[in-house]
């Protein structure tokens, strides 16, 4: 772990739920990083799908 760290207080239920996302030997930092990476990837993919949907609404001049 590089740099300064901090403590984030969460209810025990939230901590326990977070644990279920991890694998044996993973730290909370590892689990959070993995989850954030997945969210960023999902957001990227959704943005790409929106772009493709928008693109299909246009007609190329050569098709007109």
Image (cartoon, rainbow, N blue to C red):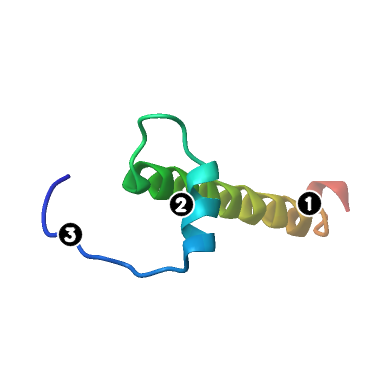
Above or below 13: residue 36: above
Residue 35 point in image, percent of width and height:
49, 48
Q: Tell me if 5 is positioned left or right of 36 in this view.
A: left
Foreground label between 2 and 3:
3
Q: Residue at x 11, y 54 (%)?
A: 3
Q: Report helix, strand or loop for mark 3.
A: loop
Residue 48 point in image, percent of width and height:
63, 50
Q: CA distance from mark 2 to mark 3?
A: 18 Å
57 and 7: which one is in front? Answer: 7
Foreground label between 1 and 3:
3
56 and 34: which one is in front? Answer: 34
Classify residue 53 by image quadrant. bottom right
On residue 60, the disc is 1
Q: Which residue is mark 2?
A: 36
Which of pointers 2 and 3 lies earlier in the amino acid sequence?
3
Above or below 54: residue 25: above
Q: Which residue is mark 3?
A: 5
26 and 43: which one is in front? Answer: 26
């Amino acid at each position: 772990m590089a740099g300064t760290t901090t403590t984030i207080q969460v209810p025990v239920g939230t901590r326990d739920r977070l644990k279920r996302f991890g694998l044996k030997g993973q730290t909370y930092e590892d689990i959070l990083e993995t989850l954030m990476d997945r969210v960023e990837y999902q957001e990227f993919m959704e943005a790409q799908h929106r772009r493709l949907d928008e693109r299909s609404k246009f007609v190329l001049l050569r098709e007109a």
